[in-house]
Amino acid sequence: MTLQQLIYVVEAADNESINKAAEKLFVSQPSISEAIKDLEEELGMQIFNRTNRGITVTAQGDEFLGYARQMIEFHNMICERYTDEKTGKKHFSVSSQHYSFAVEAFIHTVQEFGMDEYEFAMHETKTGEVIENVKTLKSELGILYMNDFNRDALNKIFKRDQIEFTPLFDCNICVFLANENPLSKKKKIKIEELYDYPCISFEQGKDNSFYFAEEVLSTNDYKRVIKVDDRSTGLNLMKGLNAFTLCSGILCEELNGDGYSAVPLDTNDTMTVGYIRLAKVPLSDIAGQYIEKLKKYENKVIKVKK
């Protein structure tokens, strides 16, 4: 097995075509086909199903691709850190649930390190993709929350995928809503008071499980639920429909403006915001600086008197 074979397999999978992979890598199509076939024979497994319409990844192949991506990324990291030969810009990527503070900290990190030496990526996405992106090293870090409800389920996934979760801070659960909403003036909101308003829920796609929900207390039976894919749509719905979502309570006026409030929910439940990373992979300097910026948001957590 060679690194070149792994690169061929990943490129073919990403393009769903050996021909397209050959074009992108400037290699002949027969060369890639033969290299992948040799790899499949060496492994004793089929990575791709081949049809007249192209290729699809097999179940075994999908698992193998996760390891292949890691190996390629490890190679790139070693080259960047230890070789004198310049391999282009360094990469730093973060995947996160839909948190304004994660994006704001990312902006400050980019401003500090600059874009001359780094290529940056910020993926605000579904919970399952946050985990998958860290597993495959598409992102060095992932930002998400855990609580008593989803902790066991997520920890099983993390153990399986060799991922570590590190807490950043604990939060009381808050209701995030526009200032025009009548509930925004309250000191605390009871869960029953929310039932007459639309609840915003982030779409999770094929990983549509309560354990993957970004909204705490996702098992509550709300009368009205609106699924969204991005944070800006949610903010617009809060303004236009008096909608709400449950969150950490950390407001980022620098990004969202001052038209929104976070009001503590009358509950004893809490959530822990933290970051995930692939175990045993050393953190880059820029990742360490980003984490330090995230820790500072603990000062913005709303403290609720018991």
Image: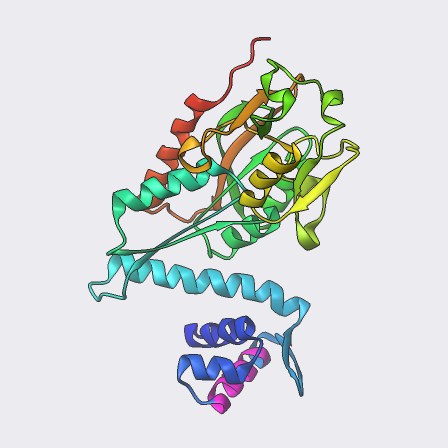
Instruction: Say if the magenta span includes residue 80.
Output: no
Look at the image and tell me whether residue 144 can be seen: yes
Counting from the top left corner in percent of width and height, residue 162 is at 54, 48
Q: Nearer the viewer, residue 81 or 252?
A: 252
Q: Which residue corresponds to the image point at 52% horizontal and 87% vertical from the top-left?
A: 34
Q: Nearer the viewer, residue 202 or 63?
A: 202
Q: Which residue corresponds to the image point at 57% horizontal and 47% vertical from the top-left?
A: 230
Q: Residue furthest left?
A: 84
Counting from the top left corner in percent of width and height, residue 181 is at 62, 26
Specify whether 167 is left or right of 287.
right
Q: Nearer the viewer, residue 34 or 105?
A: 105
Quarter occupied by residue 51: bottom right
Predominant SS along the magenta part: helix
In this view, 189 is above or below 156: above
In this view, 115 is above or below 199: below
Specify whether 42 is left or right of 7.
right
Counting from the top left corner in percent of width and height, residue 39 is at 54, 78
Q: Nearer the viewer, residue 254 or 17?
A: 254
Look at the image and tell me whether residue 46 can be seen: no
Specify whether 147 is left or right of 108.
right
Q: Which residue corresponds to the image point at 36% horizontal and 43% vertical from the top-left?
A: 107
In this view, 3 is above or below 83: below
Q: Which residues are magenta?
A: 29-40
In this view, 174 is above or below 128: above
Q: Which residue corresponds to the image point at 67% horizontal and 67% vertical from the top-left?
A: 59
Counting from the top left corner in percent of width and height, residue 201 is at 67, 40
Instruction: Say if the magenta span includes residue 36.
Output: yes
